[in-house]
Image: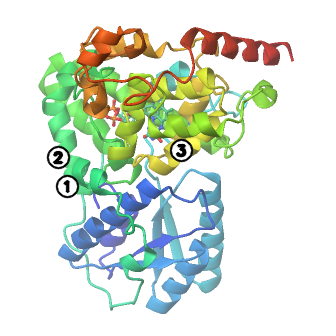
Amino acid sequence: MSDHPALHAAAKTGAPVLCLFVVDDTAGRAPGAATRWWLAQSLRSLGAAIAARGGSLVLRKGPAAKVIGEFARESGARAVYWNEIAQAPHRAVESQLAAMLARLGIGSQSFPGDLLVPPSVIRTKDGRGLRVFTPFWRRLLSLGDPPKPLPAPKQLRPAPNIAGDVLESWRLEPSKPDWAGGLREAWTPGEASARARLRDFLSHTVRRYVGDRDRPDRDGTSGLSPHLRFGELSPRQIWHAARFATDDDPALGPGIAKFLSELGWREFCRHLLHDHPNLATANLQTNFDGFPWKRDAKALAAWQRGRTGYPIVDAGLRELWHTGVMHNRVRMVVASFLVKHLLIDWREGEAWFWDTLVDADAGSNPANWQWVAGCGADAAPYFRVFNPQLQGEKFDPDGTYVRRWVPELEDMPARLIHRPWQATPIELASAGITLGKTYPQPIVDHAKGRERALAAYTTIRKG
Ligand code: FAD
């Protein structure tokens, strides 16, 4: 409810306020299973917060412009307020809605959404969006601080009751089977929990952020991405809280600067999505259109289940399945493994993440997949092929992360945990491992996989 410009403006009018949440299956991408689970929890928490201030949250389903127009008429609303979403399908809904409300003689007003800066502000001289992060970030910083976040309204004037859907009828949560136990264990969706996480991060973790943010074996990042994804915390709130923390303690400066630049990547991805609505389906670099991807259902399934035989890759994919997130460093490693070692189309990996991540984001997910695959804006060069063993040894040196998510390797000594295939039969036996039985052999040899990836890349470079 806080830093919600539309709600803030509506409450300020002093008129009765009705809050409406619409699920529109016809606009944008259908949400994945993990985000549906989060949405249910988030709506419960939001409904309770609105009720505590005297208001009510009504749920409806259907084409958004039509549903909102009907709702406005039914309730006798004088005006409709909303926050903008800078994505093509939502922009289309917003202009339809504005036109419909005008026809009905109902006022309407839209407000900035969940970005630091609207995409229209950061453009090249000829009006295009920036495709390289560093100049984008410099430009954003040169604009100064974003507007200060708005407080949540203290009170909402109650409006007459209007019927809506019962949340459970939307069937957002899994029941048979109920696979969400790991998500419940890992997360408490909602604004209060988001604020607590931010406070905790700025009081403790940020001190170690520069050194620890790449370490999946440490609790070194904010864990704010799903809260941001669902608007439980806005980037403006994070920005100002972080600035305030540095004013208080200048020693936090480097950690805060790095953290804010990560928030800048979120912004960059959203701006890219604004300019490239097909970000999840079309290569930004079109020379990749002829890339010789392999169709390999067996390898894809082994990757999805965390059974590739590369411990850091398997740990990441199992962490994802259990908690709905994966450490950023490991996201890069598993994504690189899929598109380079297995030569599987990045869109397959992106779709898996979309379904299983609680922070699955229409901008950040495809933009990062394209970045790893080498076909994106400001992309990692294709010939940079991560070696999963070395990545594991560097960023999880004691194997703590692998042991947490791949318990069958628990008793492996640290020096072998990222390369069990090189252990002697005696070493394997004393760790209780039978390769190929209790833990898989690598599904592809690193050196061969790398060579094959580079050869495939050569075909499009020539073409
Ligand atoms: P922190 O390190 O605390 O960073 C703070 C915030 O900055 C994050 O919450 C996030 O909003 C933003 N951020 C950090 N890194 C990135 C990045 N590379 N790109 C965009 N924003 C970033 N992030 C998502 O929010 N949703 C996704 O669907 C998503 N898919 C990804 C797919 C791949 C293949 C890769 C490599 C990265 C993806 N990321 C995605 C980015 C990143 O992994 C997560 O944002 C990060 O792990 C979230 O953890 P945190 O909140 O603790 O991050």
Residue 196 is left or right of residue 231, and the answer is: left
Q: Position of residue 320 (x, y in %)?
A: 39, 41
Q: Position of residue 90 (x, y in %)?
A: 59, 59
Tell me which image quadrant ligand 1 sits in. Answer: top left
Quarter holding residue 346: top right
Dot placed on the residue nearer the N-terminal end, 3 or 1: 1
The quadrant in which the N terminus is found is bottom left
Q: Three-letter amino acid code at disc 3?
A: Trp
Residue 313 is left or right of residue 403, and the answer is: right
Which residue is labeled 2 in the image?
A: 196
The Cα–Cα distance between marks 1 and 2, rounded to whole angstroms, is 6 Å
The Cα–Cα distance between marks 3 and 2, rounded to whole angstroms, is 30 Å
Of residues 286 and 259, the one drawn nearer to the viewer in this rendering: 286
Mark 3 in CB contact with mark 1 (< 8 angstroms): no
Res. 192 mark: 1
Which residue is labeled 3 in the image?
A: 352
**Callout 3: helix, strand or loop?**
helix
Q: Three-letter amino acid code at disc 2?
A: Ala
Which is closer to the viewer, label 3 or label 1?
3
The Cα–Cα distance between marks 3 and 1, rounded to whole angstroms, is 29 Å
